[in-house]
Image: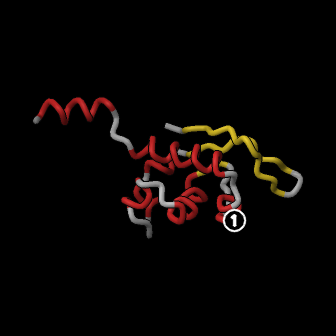
Amino acid sequence: MQKTITLGFPVVRGKTEIKEVTITEAMQQTGSLRGLKLYDVMTSDVDSLIKLLPRVTSPSLTEVEVSQLNVQDFSQLAAGIADFLAPSSASSETAAGEI
């Protein structure tokens, strides 16, 4: 699963404008969360996401670029991260059936 976010305010890197950022499959690997508190990531803690997004985006954004994102673009990326952390509907139905 990958999720592509179209930025309302592109990131300018030299002569290049980054208009789309993809949250990659790396987000599905526990190692991407190394050094971060899962609760902070799940609650969209800004500092945690500034550290996480460079690890899981393509093109890979730097921490400085993430910290300078427009708040609407940052919010979209945070929502994209939350989508990766949400349980799939199939596993939710299984868990509900076991109760």
Quadrant for residue 62, please give it: bottom right
Q: Residue at 42% of width from left, 55% of height from top?
A: 43
Q: Is residue 50 above or below residue 24?
A: below
Colour convention of the picture:
secondary structure
Residue located farthest toward the front when viewing the structure as drawn? 71
Q: Is residue 94 left or right of residue 63?
A: left
Disc 1: CA contacts within 10 A as few (<14), some (14-19) or many (>=20): few
SS state under label 1: helix
- Quadrant of the snapshot with the C terminus: top left
Quadrant in the rendering for residue 23: top right
Q: Give the answer, above or below, for where 61 lies relative to 21.
A: below
Q: Tell me residue 18's x, y (percent).
A: 76, 46
Read off the residue under disc 1. 64
Residue 49, x across and y down, in percent: 53, 59
Q: Amino acid at mark 1?
A: Val
Residue at image point 56% right, 38% down: 3
Residue located 77% across and 46% down the image: 10
Left or right of 6 on screen, residue 14: right
Which x, y percent locates residue 32? 47, 59
Q: Position of residue 63 (x, y in %)?
A: 64, 64
Vertical order, 78 against 55 (above or below): above
| Residue drawn at x 29%, y 30% as measured from the top left | 90
> How many marks do you count on the picture?
1
Which image quadrant for residue 76? Answer: top right
Of residue 54 and residue 66, the one placed in the foreground of this image is 66
